[in-house]
C-alpha cells in the first residue's frame, strides 16, 4: 500500500516541511518560509543567496549529474558500486553533500525511474538531502521525456506519440495538450525540468540521431509545434528545454559517437534552423540545450557549438535575445570531447555562455577544473554568479523554494490517469499516416481476412512500453476482432527466417509487416517482397522512419507509425482495422529509392478512407 502522506522518501519517516526548513542554514529557510502561495523570492533575495555561497558551492550549482539508484539514501548494492566507480560516492545524498550539485538527471538505466511512487520518493529524498546541508538549496531534477522513442519514465505514466508523429498530426492543440499532461505528470513525481521539445528541423533522411525525434522538415510547422509544446509544459510548472541549438537536423553523424559538421550557410541557418528556436524564445522557453556539433558558417574556429562563444553568446544571447538557462547536452558525448580533454570542456563551456553543465563523464575532474579556473583567474567568480542567478531564478519560478516536495496523493491523482491515457490514444489516432492503399485493401475486413500474421522487426522497446512491436500489434489486432499471431523476424532476417515467415503466411489470410529503417539490400525488403509473392495481402507498417515506403514498392498497403511505442502501434492497428480513419500527413518528404533527388511523397501527403 502506497504512503499517501506528503513526500515520503521510502526510507525513513519524512519530516514536515517546517522541520526541514528549520534545519537549513537560515538563508533558504527564510526564502521558503510562509504559506505555499507566498510570492517567489525576488532577484535581490536570490542575489543575497548567491553572495553567501562558498566558491565550492557555486561551482556545484552549475552541474547537473546522473546518479545510480532508486533511493537517495538506500540504493541497491549494485547501484552503490556503480556510483563508487563512476562518481566516488555511494548515494545521491553523498553526491549532494560532496559536490553540492544544482541538478540531478534521471535515467531509466540508472534505475531512477522504476515507477511513479518510487520516483516521487527519490525526488523527495534528493530534496531533503540537499536542503538539510548548510545553506542547502532545492535541486532542479531533470530528465529526457521527449515521448516516442526517447522516454525515461514509462508505464504506468502516460506515454505520448513522439515529435514526428505529432508533426504528422499537425495539431498545435494536441502538442499543447501533450506538454500540459506530460508536464503535470512529471511535476507530480518531482521532475521540474524536461529536456524537450526537440527543435531541430530534420531535413536529412540519413540523420542517425534526430530523425523521428523532430517534428519534421518544415521550419514553420516545427516552430508552431515547438511553441505549443513549450506552452503546455510550462503551463504545468515544468521547465521545457528546446534542443539542440543551433540545430541538429541536417547531419549524418551521431554526436554521441562522433563530431558532426553542419554545412549550412548563415542564410540557410537563419531560414531553416533558427525559426523553431526563435519561436521557443518568443514562447518564454525556460531552458535551451546546446548541440555538440560544428557550424563553420556561425563559428569557423572548429569548436563545437557547446564551446562556442560566438554561437552561444553572440547569436543565442545577443542576437536572439535569450536570457534564460543554457544547458549543455551530455558532456560524456564524443562530439564535445573530441577536441579538448574532459577537464577543459566545462571551463570552455562556461566561457562560451553555458549555465548548466550536464552529466560530465568524470564529475570530480570537471568540478575541480572549474574551481581551479576561478582560483587561477581564467574564470571570474562574477561569471559564475551570472549563471547561478539564472539557475536560481528558474528554481524560484518553478516553486522549488516554496514547495520542494511532492505528495504520493498527487501521484495517484495525476500520473497515468484514465483521462490522460485516453488523451494519448486520441492524439495518436490523428498521427498514423497512410501512404499506399492499392485496391483499397485497407481498412482490412475481419470477415474477409480473419487470420492475420504479424511479422517484422522487433527492436528493443522504448523505455516503459510493453514490446515487442510485433506482439503489441498482434495483441491490438486481436482486441479488434482478428485472430492475430506474432512472428518476430528481426531487423536483418536471414533466408531461413524469411522462409519460416513465408510458410506461416500461407496459413494466414493477411500479413502485417512491421519494418524498421529498411535499406536497399536489407533482409527486411526481401521479407516483404517474398510475403507479397505468396499472394496474401501485405500491410507494411514503418515503425520508425517513414522513408521505408520508398524501399517497398511491392507492398499493396503502407502506413507510417513513426515509433514502436504502444500508443503508436495501437493507433496503427485501429487504422488497419478501420476503427479510425488515417489522418496523418507526412511532416517530411520521402525521396525515391532509386533517385534521391526526386520526391516520391511530399510533405503533407497522406491518404484516408
Image (spheres, rainbow, N blue to C red):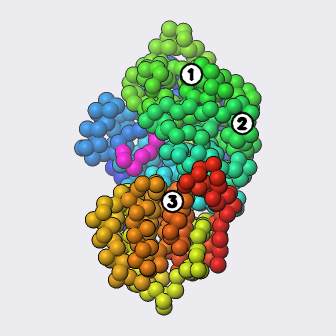
Between marks 2 and 1, how big is the CA–CA gap?
Answer: 19 Å
Quarter that holds the N terminus:
bottom left
Q: Which residue is mark 3?
A: 551
Q: Is residue 511 visible?
A: yes
The x and y percentages for residue 95 are 38, 33
Give the magenta part as a residue range: 103-110
| N-terminal label among 2 and 3 | 2
Between marks 1 and 3, how big is the CA–CA gap?
Answer: 37 Å
The x and y percentages for residue 570 are 50, 71
Q: Which residue is mark 2?
A: 268
The x and y percentages for residue 520 are 46, 54
Badge 1 marks a residue whose secondary structure is loop
Badge 3 marks a residue whose secondary structure is helix
Between marks 2 and 3, how big is the CA–CA gap?
Answer: 30 Å
Q: Which residue is mark 1?
A: 302
Residue at 56% of width from left, 48% of height from top?
205
Q: Is residue 317 left or right of residue 534?
A: right
Front residue of 204 and 431: 204
Magenta segment includes 109: yes
Amino acid at each position: 500500500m502506497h504512503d499517501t502522506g506528503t513526500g515520503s522518501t521510502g526510507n525513513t519517516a519524512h519530516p514536515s516541511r517546517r522541520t526541514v526548513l528549520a534545519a537549513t542554514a537560515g538563508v533558504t529557510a527564510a526564502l521558503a518560509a510562509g504559506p505555499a502561495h507566498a510570492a517567489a523570492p525576488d532577484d535581490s533575495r536570490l542575489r543575497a543567496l548567491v553572495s553567501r555561497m562558498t566558491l565550492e558551492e557555486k561551482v556545484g550549482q552549475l552541474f547537473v549529474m546522473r546518479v545510480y539508484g532508486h533511493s537517495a539514501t538506500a540504493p541497491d548494492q549494485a547501484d552503490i558500486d556503480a556510483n563508487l566507480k563512476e562518481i566516488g560516492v555511494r548515494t545521491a545524498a553523498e553526491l549532494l553533500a560532496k559536490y553540492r550539485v544544482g541538478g540531478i538527471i534521471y535515467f531509466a538505466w540508472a534505475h531512477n525511474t522504476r515507477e511513479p511512487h518510487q520516483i516521487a520518493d527519490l525526488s523527495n529524498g534528493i530534496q531533503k538531502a540537499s536542503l538539510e546541508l548548510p545553506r542547502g538549496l532545492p535541486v532542479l531534477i531533470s530528465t529526457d521525456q521527449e515521448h516516442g522513442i526517447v522516454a525515461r519514465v514509462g508505464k504506468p505514466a502516460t506515454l505520448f506519440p513522439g515529435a514526428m508523429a505529432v508533426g504528422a498530426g499537425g495539431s498545435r492543440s494536441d502538442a499543447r495538450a501533450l506538454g500540459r499532461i506530460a508536464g503535470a505528470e512529471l511535476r507530480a513525481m518531482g521532475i521540474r525540468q524536461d529536456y524537450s521539445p526537440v527543435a531541430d528541423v530534420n531535413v536529412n533522411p540519413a540523420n542517425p540521431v534526430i530523425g523521428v525525434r523532430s517534428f519534421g522538415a518544415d521550419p514553420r510547422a516545427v516552430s508552431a509545434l515547438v511553441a505549443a509544446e513549450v506552452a503546455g509544459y510550462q503551463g504545468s510548472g515544468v521547465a521545457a528545454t528546446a534542443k539542440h541549438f543551433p540545430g541538429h537536423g541536417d547531419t549524418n553523424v551521431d554526436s554521441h559517437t562522433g563530431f558532426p559538421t553542419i554545412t549550412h550557410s548563415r542564410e540557410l541557418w537563419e531560414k531553416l534552423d533558427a525559426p523553431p528556436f526563435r519561436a521557443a524564445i518568443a514562447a518564454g522557453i525556460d531552458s535551451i540545450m546546446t548541440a555538440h556539433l560544428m557550424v563553420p558558417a556561425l563559428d569557423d574556429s572548429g569548436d563545437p557549438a557547446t564551446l562556442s562563444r560566438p554561437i552561444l553568446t553572440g547569436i543565442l544571447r545577443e542576437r536572439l535575445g535569450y536570457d534564460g538557462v543554457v544547458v549543455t547536452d551530455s558532456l560524456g558525448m564524443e562530439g564535445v570531447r573530441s577536441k579538448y580533454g574532459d577537464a577543459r570542456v566545462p571551463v570552455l563551456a562556461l566561457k562560451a555562455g553555458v549555465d548548466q553543465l550536464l552529466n560530465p563523464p568524470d564529475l570530480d575532474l570537471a568540478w575541480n577544473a572549474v574551481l581551479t579556473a576561478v582560483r587561477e583567474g581564467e574564470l571570474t567568480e562574477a561569471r559564475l554568479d551570472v549563471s547561478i542567478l539564472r539557475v536560481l531564478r528558474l528554481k524560484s519560478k518553478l516553486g522549488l523554494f516554496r514547495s520542494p516536495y511532492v505528495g504520493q496523493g498527487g501521484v495517484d491523482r495525476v500520473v497515468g490517469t484514465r483521462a490522460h491515457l485516453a488523451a494519448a490514444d486520441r492524439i495518436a489516432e490523428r498521427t498514423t499516416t497512410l501512404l499506399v492503399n492499392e485496391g483499397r485493401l485497407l481498412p482490412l475486413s475481419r470477415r474477409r481476412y480473419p487470420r492475420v500474421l504479424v511479422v517484422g522487426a522487433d527492436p528493443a522497446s522504448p523505455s516503459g512500453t510493453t514490446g515487442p512491436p510485433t506482439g503489441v500489434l498482434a495483441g491490438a489486432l486481436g482486441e479488434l476482432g482478428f485472430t492475430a499471431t506474432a512472428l518476430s523476424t528481426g531487423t536483418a532476417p536471414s533466408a531461413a527466417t524469411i522462409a519460416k515467415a513465408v510458410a506461416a503466411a500461407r496459413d494466414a489470410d493477411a500479413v502485417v509487416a512491421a519494418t524498421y529503417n529498411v535499406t536497399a539490400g536489407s533482409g527486411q525488403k526481401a521479407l516483404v517482397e517474398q510475403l507479397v509473392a505468396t499472394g496474401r495481402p501485405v500491410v507494411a507498417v514503418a515503425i520508425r522512419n517513414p522513408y521505408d515506403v520508398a524501399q517497398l514498392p511491392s507492398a499493396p498497403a503502407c502506413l507510417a507509425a513513426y515509433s514502436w511505442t504502444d500508443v503508436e502501434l495501437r493507433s496503427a492497428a485501429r487504422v488497419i482495422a478501420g476503427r479510425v480513419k488515417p489522418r496523418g500527413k507526412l511532416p517530411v518528404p520521402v525521396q525515391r529509392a532509386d533517385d534521391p533527388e526526386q520526391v516520391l511523397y511530399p510533405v503533407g501527403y497522406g491518404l484516408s478512407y
